[in-house]
Amino acid sequence: MGAADSEATVVLGGSGFLGAHAVSMALRRADIDHPVVSVSRGPGEGPLFGRHRSQPHFERADARDPDALLAALEGWRPARVINCLALARGADCEEDPLLASLLNAQVPGLLARWCGRNGARLVHVSTDLVFGDAPPPAPGGFREQDAPAPISAYGATKAAGERAVLAACPRAIVVRLPLLYGASGGRELGASDSFLGAVERGDVPRLFSDEWRTPLLVEDAASALLELAWGAGSGLLHVGGPDRVSRIQLGLALLIARGLEPGDAEARVSAARRADAALDPPRPEDTSLDSSRARVVLRTRLRGLREGAARACAP
């Protein structure tokens, strides 16, 4: 097994919603001798959040050309790789399952093989949507040992990516994240900015009262990824919020955090049930994650919905 030639941290998908926060967190953690590299297909470089003593290095590479990603890794020879790359929109995955398989399963396997050969620490991001065909077997949500049972092309390809990563690099850690919300730098990405943007335009978003998740503030997710990148654990880890809520409860919490009274918040959304909607691709009823293990092993605090919504909606 080789060894990393630098103390660089590479964030793949660094211009995305989660990736931009991971880059920002890496900059706050690293010093001048620990370069932070944001790799994305461009042309945007992604916003930065918070104060930083240095700037990231930006590399342009399209994940549809895996050789370009591997070339970026060869160029930096990083000590740590955080993989936030994915084809994440469910409709895109259903429309182009081959591309979904490439980006969500095959590319992670290639990255894991590179990290295994070169001694780089790999933190691979997965999703709660590897579950969904049946409700959680325990009240606290799905645990790491529960078998994946996805109902969408996105969930199926992400589950395949998990298997590929752990087979190629057993020392890697695969982090299953839930629905993420928080600041996206004005891009209306994530569960809060996209929703709040629609409300501000006068739309009345339809939110399901029977779809359950354990949403997490994106800053906390990024902080956990960076902590794990400097850590030594391996295998699967669930990193979700402590509150199991419906999508409409999430929306109302965000509007109230924005300053609306509960009655006014309820008037700005439309409650719906999954059975009454023609959902394509299908959406699972409950993919709540049991993150009790993460709360033991992480120093990062995984904030609950009330505190997280206040943070997400702060000016």
Image: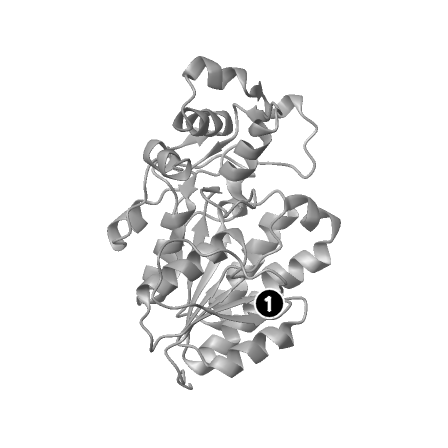
Front-most of residues 57 and 195:
57
Q: Please report the residue visible at 60 percent of the width from the left and 36 percent of the height from the top.
A: 283
Tell me where residue 274 appears, x and y as whole percent. Answer: 61, 26
Quarter of the figure with the C terminus: top left
Quarter of the figure with the N terminus: bottom left
Q: Please report the residue visible at 46 percent of the width from the left and 72 percent of the height from the top.
A: 169
> In this picture, is 292 found above or below 84?
above
Tell me where residue 263 appears, x and y as whole percent. Answer: 45, 13
Does residue 263 appear anywhere in the picture?
Answer: yes
The residue carrying mark 1 is 107
Local SS, label 1: helix
Front-most of residues 169 and 82:
82
Amino acid marked by disc 1 = Val
**Which quarter of the figure has residue 278?**
top right
> In this picture, is 3 found above or below 209?
below
**Which quarter of the figure has residue 313?**
top left
